C-alpha cells in the first residue's frame, strides 16, 4: 500500500511561531499570557470564519454580509442573558455556564433561521454573480444592522461576563484570564466537531465533494441546493456563536461589531485556503498570535501585522495554507 | 426498431449565444452498447450533458424508459437510473477512492459482492482504496469514475471519452472492463477513437455540427471502409 503524503508544514507553523517568539519576548510569564490571549482570540476568529469559508468553498458565494450574523448572534444572546441575570451573577459556575449555554443556543437558532432567510431572499437571485453578491450582501448587512438599532436601540449594550468567568488564574507569574481558556475550549470543540462531521459522515463527504465539484455531486443524485441552504444556515449559526464569544470578550455590543471583524475574517479564510476548515483554523491562530506578539514587541507593526502575514503566506502558497 | 431505453427527439441545446445541438434524434437500445462518434466540437459531450440535465434542452424531448426527463433536474435524472462518467472524470480528488465510491452508493452501504466484481477488472482500486483520488494516475482516475457510476446497478450508463489521454495498455484494460459491463447495463459511449469502440459497440451514431448524420449497426460501419472515411474522415485514419 503506497503511503499517503501528508502536508505537515502548515500544522507546524503555529507551534513554530510560538516557540520562535519565546526568546524574543524574553519573559516566560509574559510569553504565556500573550500566547494564551492569542490562542483565545484566534479561536474566536476561527469560529466566526469557519462558516464563511464553507459557504464560499461550497457555494462560491462572496458573503460580505457574514458580519451581520456575528452581530445578530451577540444581540440575540441578550434575549437569554438579560432575563437570566440572576444565574449570570450567581456564585455557581454551573449556573453561569448553563445560562451561557442557553444564550449560545438562542444565538445559534436565531442566526441559523436568519441565514436560511438570507440565502432564500438575498443570495439565491445572485448565484454565480460575484459583483452582485458583494453589493447585495453588503446591503443586506446594512439592513440587518439598522434592524438591530430598531430592536435594541442605537446605544452600546453591555454584555458582562458571567461571574465565574471573570478574573484570571495565576500560574507562577503568568496571569491567564478564565474567559480566554473557555474561548480556547469552545474553539477546539467547534474545530473537532467540524472535522468529525466533514471527515466521518456522509453529509461531510457531500460537503467536501460539493466544494470540489458541485455539478458531479448532483450527477450522483444528490440535491446540492438543499445542501447549500443547510451549510449556509450552519455557517450563519457558527457566526452567531462567534458573535456571542466576541461580545463577551469585548463586554459590550454594537450593531457594527460584526462588520468590524470582517477584515480579520476575510484574511483568515484567504490565508487558510478558501473552503478549508483546517486551513481556516491554522490561519486564525497564526493571525491572532502574530498580532499579539507584534503588539508587544513592536506596537506600530501590530497595525499591519495581518496584512504582512497574509502577503507572506500568499507569496509562499498563493492558494492558501491548505493547498500546495 | 428495438425497444429504446433512451430516446432523443429533435433536441436543441443552446449554451449562451451558441446553438450547439441542432435537432438531435438518437435512440439507445435497451441492454446494448451504443456508441456516439464524432469529431471535436460535434456536440457529443453536449448531448450527454443535456441527457443528464446539466444543460437544459431548449427544444425537443429526452425520454428515458418512456418518461419525458427533459425538464427534470440533474439529481432526479440520476435517481431515475442514469449514471454519468464525464469527460473530465470529475473524481473528488480530496476524497479517497473508498469515499468516492461510498458517496456514489446512494441506497446504503456498498454491496461487497459488487465491489469484488468491480475489483476483478479494476484491481488498482483495491490497492489504492484509502488513497486520495487526486493522487492517482489518469487511468486510475478513470477507473474510479467508472466504478463510481456502477457501484450500484443503474439502468443506463453514459460514458464520455474514457480513452482520452490514456496510454494504450490502460485503454485495453478499459475495453475489457466495458465489455464486462455489457449485458449488465445499457451503455451510451461517446468516443472519437473508432478502433477502441468498433470492438465494443452494438449500434453506432455519428454526429456532426450538432446533428446525427448516421445511425445503424456497428458491424455495418466497421465493415464499410468507404462509409467510415465519409463519416469520420481523418479522425478515423489517425486512430487506425
Image (cartoon, rainbow, N blue to C red):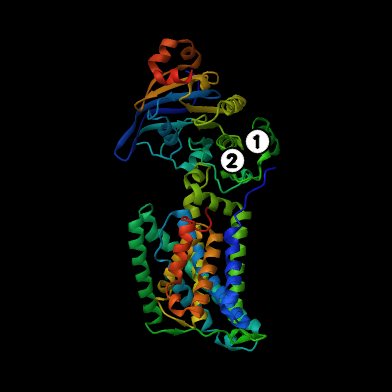
- Look at the numbered discs 1 and 2 and tell me whether their residues touch, using CB distance below 8 Å: yes
B98 or B171: nearer the viewer = B171
Number of other residues with Cα within 10 Å of mark 2, as a class: few under 14, some 14 to 19, many 20 or more: some
Residue plotted at (43% across, 15% down):
B228
Residue B12: x, y in percent? 34, 32
> Which residue is identified by label 1?
B124
- For the residue labelled by badge 1, is the local secondary structure a helix, a strand or a loop? helix
Residue plotted at (40% across, 28% down):
B40
> Which residue is identified by label 2?
B136
Say left or right for B211 vs B92: left
User: Which quadrant: the N terminus of chain A?
Assistant: top right
Looking at the rendered structure, the number of numbered marks drawn on it comes to 2
Residue plotted at (33% across, 58% down):
A132
Q: Chain of mark 2?
A: B
Q: Is residue A98 visible?
A: no
Q: Are marks 1 and 2 on the same chain?
A: yes
Residue A312: x, y in percent? 47, 63
Q: Chain of mark 1?
A: B
Number of other residues with Cα within 10 Å of mark 1, as a class: few under 14, some 14 to 19, many 20 or more: some
* Placement of A112 over or under A97, stated as above or below: above
Say left or right for A138 vs B122: left
Residue B48: x, y in percent? 45, 33
* Mark 1 to mark 2 CA distance (whole Å): 10 Å
Q: Is residue A38 visible?
A: yes
- For the residue labelled by badge 2, is the local secondary structure a helix, a strand or a loop? loop
Residue A214: x, y in percent? 48, 47
Of the numbered discs 1 and 2, the one sitting upstream in the chain is 1
* Placement of B198 over or under A123, stated as above or below: above
A2 or B94: nearer the viewer = A2
Residue plotted at (36% across, 59% down):
A133
* Placement of A107 over or under B20, stated as above or below: below
Amino acid at each position: 500500500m503506497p503511503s499517503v503524503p501528508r502536508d505537515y508544514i502548515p500544522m507546524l507553523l503555529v507551534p513554530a511561531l510560538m516557540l520562535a517568539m519565546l526568546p524574543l519576548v524574553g519573559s516566560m510569564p509574559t510569553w504565556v499570557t500573550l500566547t494564551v490571549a492569542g490562542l483565545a482570540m484566534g479561536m474566536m476568529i476561527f469560529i466566526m470564519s469557519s462558516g464563511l469559508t464553507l459557504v464560499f468553498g461550497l457555494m462560491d458565494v462572496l458573503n460580505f454580509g457574514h458580519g451581520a450574523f456575528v452581530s445578530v448572534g451577540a444581540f440575540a444572546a441578550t434575549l437569554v442573558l438579560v432575563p437570566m441575570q440572576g444565574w449570570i451573577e450567581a456564585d455557581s459556575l454551573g449556573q453561569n455556564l448553563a445560562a451561557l449555554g442557553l444564550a449560545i443556543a438562542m444565538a445559534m437558532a436565531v442566526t441559523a433561521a436568519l441565514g436560511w432567510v438570507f440565502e432564500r431572499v438575498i443570495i439565491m437571485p445572485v448565484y454565480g454573480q460575484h459583483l452582485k453578491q458583494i453589493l447585495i450582501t453588503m446591503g443586506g448587512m446594512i439592513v440587518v444592522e439598522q434592524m438591530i438599532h430598531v430592536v435594541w436601540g442605537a446605544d452600546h449594550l453591555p454584555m458582562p461576563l458571567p461571574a465565574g468567568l471573570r478574573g484570571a488564574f495565576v500560574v507562577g507569574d503568568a496571569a491567564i484570564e478564565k474567559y480566554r481558556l473557555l474561548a480556547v475550549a469552545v474553539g477546539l470543540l467547534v474545530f473537532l466537531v467540524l472535522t468529525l462531521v466533514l471527515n466521518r459522515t456522509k453529509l461531510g463527504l457531500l460537503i467536501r465533494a460539493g466544494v470540489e465539484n458541485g455539478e458531479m455531486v448532483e450527477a450522483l443524485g444528490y440535491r446540492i441546493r438543499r445542501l447549500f441552504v443547510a451549510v449556509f444556515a450552519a455557517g450563519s449559526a457558527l457566526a452567531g456563536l462567534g458573535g456571542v464569544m466576541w461580545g463577551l470578550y469585548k463586554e459590550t455590543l454594537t450593531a457594527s461589531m460584526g462588520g468590524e471583524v470582517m477584515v480579520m475574517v476575510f484574511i483568515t479564510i484567504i490565508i487558510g485556503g478558501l473552503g478549508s476548515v483546517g486551513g481556516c483554523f491554522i490561519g486564525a491562530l497564526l493571525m491572532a498570535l502574530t498580532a499579539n506578539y507584534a503588539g508587544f514587541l513592536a506596537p506600530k507593526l501590530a497595525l499591519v501585522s495581518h496584512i504582512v502575514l497574509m502577503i507572506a503566506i500568499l507569496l509562499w502558497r498563493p492558494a492558501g495554507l491548505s493547498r500546495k | 426498431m428495438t425497444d429504446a431505453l433512451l430516446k432523443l427527439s429533435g433536441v436543441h441545446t443552446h449554451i449562451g449565444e451558441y446553438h450547439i445541438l441542432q435537432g438531435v434524434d438518437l435512440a439507445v437500445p435497451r441492454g446494448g452498447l451504443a456508441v456516439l462518434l464524432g469529431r471535436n466540437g460535434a456536440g457529443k459531450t453536449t448531448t450527454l450533458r443535456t441527457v443528464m440535465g446539466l444543460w437544459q434542452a431548449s427544444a425537443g424531448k429526452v425520454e428515458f424508459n418512456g418518461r419525458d426527463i427533459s425538464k427534470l433536474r440533474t439529481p432526479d435524472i440520476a435517481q431515475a437510473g442514469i449514471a454519468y462518467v464525464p469527460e473530465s472524470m470529475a473524481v473528488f480528488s480530496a476524497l479517497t477512492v473508498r469515499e468516492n465510491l461510498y458517496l456514489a452508493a446512494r441506497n446504503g452501504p456498498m454491496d461487497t459482492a459488487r465491489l469484488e466484481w468491480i475489483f476483478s477488472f479494476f484491481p488498482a482500486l483495491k490497492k489504492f482504496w484509502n488513497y486520495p483520488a487526486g493522487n492517482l494516475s489518469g487511468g486510475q482516475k478513470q477507473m474510479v469514475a467508472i466504478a463510481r457510476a456502477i457501484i450500484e446497478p443503474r439502468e443506463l450508463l453514459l460514458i464520455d471519452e474514457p480513452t482520452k489521454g490514456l496510454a494504450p495498455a490502460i485503454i485495453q484494460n478499459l475495453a475489457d472492463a466495458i465489455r464486462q459491463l455489457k449485458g449488465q447495463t445499457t451503455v451510451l459511449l461517446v468516443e472519437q477513437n473508432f478502433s477502441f469502440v468498433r470492438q465494443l459497440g452494438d449500434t453506432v451514431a455519428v454526429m456532426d455540427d450538432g446533428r446525427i448524420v448516421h445511425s445503424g449497426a456497428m458491424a455495418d460501419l466497421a465493415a464499410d471502409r468507404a462509409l467510415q472515411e465519409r463519416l469520420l474522415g481523418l479522425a478515423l485514419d489517425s486512430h487506425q
